[in-house]
Image (cartoon, rainbow, N blue to C red):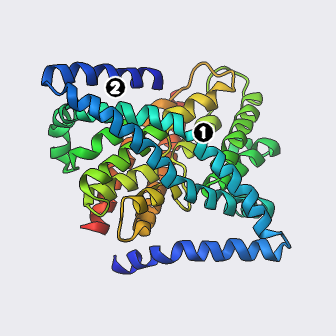
Amino acid sequence: MLNYIWAALIIISVIVGFISGRTAEVSAGILESAKTAVNVVLGLTGMMCFWTGMSAILEKSSAVKALSEIIEPLINLLFPRIKKETKAKEKIVMNICANVLGMGNAATPLGLEAMKELDRINPSTNASESMMLFLVINTCSFQLIPTSVISLRYNAGAVNPYDIIIPIWITSFLTLLSGILLCKLLERTRRSVI
Amino acid sequence: MKVINQMSMYVVPIILLTIVSIGLSKKIKVFEIFTQGAKTGLDTAVKLVPTLVGLIVAIGMFRASGAMELLVYALSPVTDWIGIPAGVMPLAILKPVSGAGSLTLVSSIMNQYGPDSFIGKLACVMMGSTETTFYVIAIYFGVTKVKNTGYMIPVAVTADVVCILLSFFVCKLFFL
């Protein structure tokens, strides 16, 4: 998908540039943007190192395990159908914790493991309810510290780069809640239709 | 609201304190583990360079050619009706597809309007509140035998729209 979007961006820019007579600006834009790209990465690097370092400490101290125990009852409530599937449940819990703690690198492999487990217990080639709910939780994922946004704000010269944390918590929590509710609602209507 | 705004300044220090104390209490060599972890952060950042160069250049061209203005203009009837600044709409469209691409847009929105402008903050809240929905769906279903994704896509798209609207209303509550 990104292949098409990227190509479309370039093709449209060149065509629109020709029509609007801004070809010179487009060419200048290439030089300027390539420089910006490197500056953006440089700006992000420090924060990225710092937070991956911090999350490494958390990982080593088995914080994920501790957090998992706390949220397990919640998972049982959300996924009543896989209550007895310990392995799938464990992976789901670990994936969610890793996401919350901002360990993107750890979260994705765990999430894929969880999907494989859910796939194993799903007899058909239709996505199971648990799969869809798990994915919705992942696509609305809640992150404790949105590090990249914070460092972008700092680089742009924000007065208080952290001021967006609580609005982000509220927004992502409510989004997550609406996603889960929608899933549960559709589960129910689908079942009553069948 | 002021109190909550104040609180956000304490969030990070408190979390750091928690992490380091947990580490020490579990008798972990905190600094050693920290540096090892930080190295993986550096790797990620280095790997990000080619992606970001490709995307930032494409979006820079899109902006310089005037195509971005056209897009924003085309969307303005809808955004005006809701009251959302039209300038964040390209971000709302790109976010579900590309994380690096939307990171690019957030930084260019902040450069254009200022990081402390309403639209700058709105872009940040949007960026921080969702995932790259379609990317996640694609790779997660990619490891399964699923052929029919059921109501997955409609729910995910709805959640993204809800997120855009919520970011706007929450930002209005906090920053206006």
Whole-percent x and y of residue B106? 37, 48
Residue contact between numbered discs 1 and 2, judged by CB atoms under 8 Å: no
Percent position (x, y) of residue A70? 71, 64
Question: As displayed, is residue B128 above or below residue A131?
Answer: below
In-front residue for pair B118/B150: B118
Q: Quadrant of the C terminus of chain A?
A: top right
Q: Which residue is painted at 67% across and 46% down in the image? A: A105
- Badge 2: chain ID: A
Label 2 belongs to which residue?
Answer: A9
Q: From the viewer's perspective, is residue B103 above or below residue B33?
A: above
Could you confirm whether marks 1 and 2 are on the same chain? Answer: no
Q: Mark 1 = which residue?
A: B47
Q: Is residue A88 above or below residue B114?
A: above
Name the residue located 37 percent from the left edge and 49 percent from the top edge. B107
Amino acid at pointer 1: Lys
Judged from the image, the secondary structure of the residue bearing numbered disc 1 is helix
Whether residue A26 is visible: yes
